[in-house]
Image: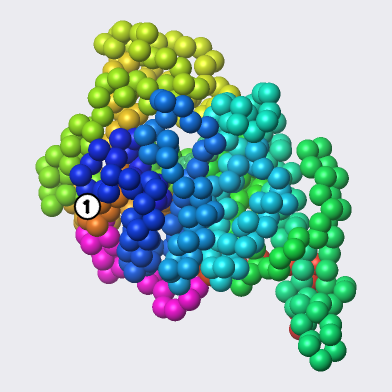
Amino acid sequence: MINGPGSHMNAWRSKDVPLDASVNIKHYIEITKIAEKAGLSFVFVADGLYINKKSIPHFLNRFEPLTLLSALATVTDRIGLVGTLSTSYSEPYTVARQFASLDKVSNGRAGWNVVTSPLEGSASNYNKGVHPEHAVRYEKAEEHVNVVQGLWDSWEDDAFIRDRESGVFFEDDKLHSLNHEGKFFSVKGPLNIERSLQGQPVIFQAGSSETGKDFAARKADVIFTNQDTIEKAKAFYRDVKFRAKKNGRDPEEILVFPSLTPIVGTSEEDAEKKYIQLTELVSIDEALNYLGRYFDHHDFSQYPLDKPFPDIGEVGKNSFQSVTDHIKQFAQEEQLTLKEVAQRVTTPKSAFIGTGEQIAFQMIDWIEQEAADGFVLTIPVLGDLYHDFICEVVPILRERGYYELHEGHQTLREQLNLPFKQNRHRKLSTLY
Ligand SMILES: Cc1cc2nc3c(=O)[nH]c(=O)nc-3n(C[C@H](O)[C@H](O)[C@H](O)COP(=O)(O)O)c2cc1C
């Protein structure tokens, strides 16, 4: 996950990254090239559509994902390029064009992280009065993705003959209009761009609510999730695979990638020291602000810091539902004070802290125990902590046979061991 200075909410204050990291193209190019050289499968650019003064600092000033990924496509050959785009505030025809273009520009390396936009304020930036409710957003997301995927199959793979001699540019019966009329969208098609080397971009999704998981189980190739223990990750993994199966899919067709926030040290004490340094990047006021962000910018400064986490009822239910449920749950279970919750949320202490060897073995354990098919790396600060992971953890994974270094060009689907996406209109005769 390449989000400017890193995944820590105050990563910009670290001397390890350029001050303007979130809008510094050289920084993105550098970290992407390192990732490509190390053999990581993709870089991922997250996104949101609403800011205010309390937003994460590097969210106040950042690149739009597809613009950034297109730039990165031109300086890389192999690494996948995945970006977030919201189905609540976009038109499927535009989205289909944008990702199909990125897929062509990169020779089949594009992925779309489908989100429904948790932040209520997004409505005020998109000419809409009210932010649609959680369930409605997912209903719209499903129709949106169906339309986009339908548009992506507008042209069969050998539709463009481009025969100068005869003057025939394309074969008529290999062009397909979508003629979609649904609850939210009316889109005729066809799309004005052909398919790529991987057929269609890969669909990523990060829903963790019941509705979100059902949606991912039907539509996603990859699901991102935040799970803080191997037990919870295993339960999530089983749940998603089961839902996929119930929907008539092969469970192996949907990959579960929990986020992984590694802190690698030369010893356990050294890693602990690095964690403490991260907590020092944020003041208590900033921590309260950050916590409030998940609860639709609720003002937590009105409550006493050292008293139990306050009961705030349903606040946040319509934005980051699964995150807010999780926060309320661990606050209750562990009887934490507001201050402790705020610190835990701003500088999460992941399970992956220790020496390179310890972290590598833990990752292998998650894979072996079916808690994960892979991971999305959310490095707190994209400086030394990133290099530590690449230099200290990756070689051990490779040595143990858990990490393939691909040679030559590969599509994102190939890197993830996902099959080429066949065109739904493909004639049977072309199979032989
Ligand atoms: C690794 C990861 C990346 C995510 N990236 C984004 C993002 O770029 N933009 C966004 O609005 N939400 C993002 N989310 C949040 C999800 O889209 C989703 O809102 C959240 O997991 C809550 O699930 P729910 O919508 O089912 O309640 C991400 C979540 C995870 C775990």
Residue type at mark 1: give it: Asp
* Depicted 413 relative to depicted 231: above or below: below
> In front: 394, or 294?
294
Q: Residue at (55%, 57%) from the top-left corner? A: 111
Q: What is the magenta range?
A: 389-410
Is 383 positioned to the left or the right of 73 in the image?
A: left
Q: Residue at (29%, 26%) from the top-left corner? A: 343
Queried whether the magenta region covers residue 404, the answer comes back as yes
Location of the C terminus (image quadrant): bottom right
Is 166 positioned to the left or the right of 236 in the image?
A: right
> In front: 321, or 197?
197
> In front: 313, or 19?
19
Queried whether the magenta region covers residue 361, the answer comes back as no
Is 71 positioned to the left or the right of 242 in the image?
A: left
Q: Residue at (42%, 40%) from the top-left corner? A: 61
Q: Which residue is mark 1?
A: 384
Q: Residue 96, percent across and down?
A: 68, 55
Is any part of residue 322 visible from this angle?
Answer: no
* Depicted 279 relative to depicted 75: above or below: above
Q: Quadrant of residue 89?
A: top right
Where disc 1 sits, the SS reads: helix
Q: Residue 248, percent across and down?
A: 70, 52
> In front: 189, or 239?
189
